Image: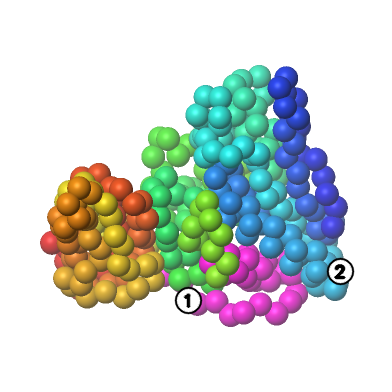
Amino acid sequence: MRRIRIFEMPSLYREPMIITGYCFGKGEKSAAIVGAMRGNEIQQLYICSQLVRRLKTLEQEGLLTAGHAVEVNPSSVNIGKRFWAMDDTDVNRMFPGYDKGETTQRIASGLFQHLIGWKWGIQFASFYLRGDFVPHVRMMSTDWSDAQTACDFGLPYVFVREPLPIDTTTLNYNWQIWDTRAYTILTSETDRIDVVSAEIAVNAVLRFLVQRGVLSCQVPKGVPAQQLRDDDIVNVHAAAAGIFRCLVKPGDLVCRDDPLGEIIDPGQGHVLREVRSPGQGCVFFACRDALVMQRQILFGLKLAADQTAQ
């Protein structure tokens, strides 16, 4: 294992910001793995740290195939809040970056210049909605996307969606434009550690690298992946504002009219609305905000093929 300095940015009022990477093997630039792109992505940072630990052991045991290089970048920020502290901008909406631009543009540029040229790119990310997912691979539908290969992660779902204009400034999208096969993995939790889903994510990456011939080790077997698109997920919205009590978790199977949660009056404590399932299927996403607004998305459900949401 080699520790390298990818990018450094001096500061007038604090220590320099340094982005560090961990390299394994030598040869073809096979796989680059990126972790926390935002300041609150502790789960993503933790996953990468565990991946570094596992890859270090595998390299020492001679299980990294000769002629392949793998790099892990656990964190691209070192602040305690989700977006950049000075101007509240999102680093993952600044790619491919601009080395003479604003702070987050320069960070994105420094990181992206180092990430160009890798064959496969894997990012651990968090969603813009606060909540938990069934661990899955997420990717954008472009001329460079490869959903079939994404099945080799062995996660239950590969979610392919059409990119929006705002997505053209993300790492995943720009990686693909620069000829890297890019995949984003989402798990449970963001600002807290979920050990179980973190282990699932680490094994998924190792499984993918074994399938690509980069590693030659034993990894727990994955599951057959099901491809999803935006219209395969039915969103359940809050009918009122109030305190939210979630009754299910991602991966739970539900039937039509099963209770999913309750919205409670914050003043008098009674239940304002019951949140019920519109059909039979699986809980794909569950909000974990304690306070919710009317019309806010509370759940995303993968309903059975013969179900119709009401």
* Residue range (magenta): 197-226
Residue 28, can we see it?
no
Q: Residue 217 appears in which quarter of the rendering?
A: bottom right
Please state if 310 lies on the left or on the right of 303 as rendered.
left
> Neighbour class for label 2 at 10 Å: few (<14), some, many (≥20)?
few
Counting from the top left corner in percent of width and height, residue 96 is at 59, 33
Please state if 189 lies on the left or on the right of 284 as rendered.
right
Q: Quadrant of the C terminus?
A: bottom left
37 over 205 or under it: above or below: above
Viewer-closest of 159 and 310: 310
Query: Residue at position x 71%, y 22% from top?
Result: 13
Q: Quadrant of the N terminus?
A: bottom right
Query: Residue at position x 81%, y 58% from top?
Result: 24
First in sequence: mark 1 vs mark 2: 2
Counting from the top left corner in percent of width and height, residue 146 is at 52, 58
**Secondary-structure class at tag 1:** loop
Count the labels in the image: 2
Label 1 and label 2: CA atoms lie apart by 31 Å
Depth check, mark 1 against mark 2: the one in front is 2
Query: Residue at position x 51%, y 30% from top?
Result: 89
Queried whether the magenta region covers residue 207, the answer comes back as yes
**Secondary-structure class at tag 2:** helix
> Which residue type carries mark 1?
Pro
Queried whether the magenta region covers residue 52, the answer comes back as no
Which residue is the site of mark 2? Answer: 60
Query: Residue at position x 49%, y 50% from top?
Result: 126
Counting from the top left corner in percent of width and height, residue 47 is at 63, 59
Residue 274, can we see it?
yes
CB contact under 8 Å: marks 1 and 2:
no
> Which residue type carries mark 2?
Gln
Which residue is the site of mark 1? Answer: 224
